[in-house]
Image (cartoon, helix red, strand yellow):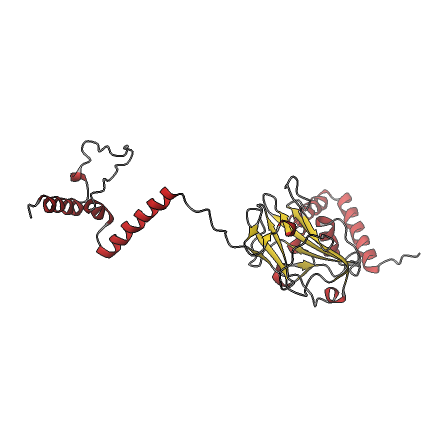
Amino acid sequence: MTFRRCPARNRSTRDFAVCLAAAAADPAVAAEIRQAAAEAERDEVAPLFEFRNLGRPLPAHWTTLVNGAAFGTDYRTRTAVAASNVFVNRHRETKYYFQDLDLHGRRLEGSREYQVTFPPGALPPAKGFWSLTLYDERHALPLATGGKVAVGSRDSGLRYGADGSLTIIVSREAVATATDGDTSSNRIVAPNGVFSLYLRIYWPDESALDGTWTPPPCTRSPPRCSKPAPEQDRSSLRQTQESRRLRRASGIPSLTLRACMNVPIKAPGVSRGIEPAGYGWAGRDPVAYGVHRESRRSRSGLV
């Protein structure tokens, strides 16, 4: 096997050699080169670690590679892969898709629940197999999540919808719904902190290679309903709601209404039911005091 030298690469190598020679001869040039290298690492290389800055952008914030293991003079993508992946196969052997964000561009994080739903007839087009894997902020498999960090076509227990769709759930907590039942086989366990999703299609179909097929969005699930409140809490809530309803209907300020209802008003920092000296009605809303006085006179038959 013979390897042909790349003319552009040869020119870059020569230019780099000239810079090193100039730096060796002049300390000022060496300092400029070191500063430029540090700025390039900070501004150009470091952002390439994030999957969202890697390769070609796709709908719903996914990105993909189109020249894996065949970069040529695409040094930027070569650097990005070395920084974030270390190794990738050739394009026609394995198709890669990367995701850092949800449908609305928010960073994926373990405190939220997400869903990736493949519509009927639109599973990843693999002649071999496919897998969806979760990686933590280090782009490593998360430690001690207590569950699976990947699902794929080789999993025999995946649960499909009645229409043939497939929903993958990414969450830190176990999920079960009345319609779908136990979805643990479709669940990837999220870690604490931010994470990324990585879809691989081994021996991809032509629809993946030409871009006809792209992955569905990663959507954030709505908050789930909390547990019903205890009976005493519900009773307190009903009283509060009734008080607010009466206040809105009468137009009377809250303090006045409480006085009309003969509800004691608790002073700050004082135990319930104990009113300190100097904190009687004289220190309260005069309108409330007047209403309370009239209410007492009415009850006593004086008016």
Q: Position of residue 74 (x, y in %)?
A: 75, 58
Residue sticking out furthest to the left: 302
| x then y, percent, for residue 176 | 57, 50
Give 59 or 259, whichever is nearer the viewer: 259
Front-lying residue, 41 or 146 = 146
Q: Is residue 281 visible?
A: yes
Task: Say which quadrant the N terminus sits in.
Answer: bottom right
Residue beneath the point at 15% across and 47% down:
291
Residue 166 drawn above or below residue 268: below
Residue found 10% across the figure and 47% down from its top: 298
Residues 294 and 31: in front is: 294
- The residue at the far right in this view is 1
Residue 206 relative to residue 196: left or right: right
Residue at the image point whose x is 25% and y is 53% from the top: 246
Does residue 93 appear left or right of residue 196 in this picture?
A: right
Q: As rendered, which of 59 and 129 lies closer to the eye?
A: 129
* Residue 199 horizontal/vertical position (percent): 69, 55
Give the residue drawn at x 81%, y 56%.
9
Image location (x, y in percent) of residue 185:
65, 50
Report the number of discs: 0
Visible in this render: residue 47? no
The quadrant in which residue 118 appears is bottom right
Q: Say above or below: 66 vs 171.
A: below
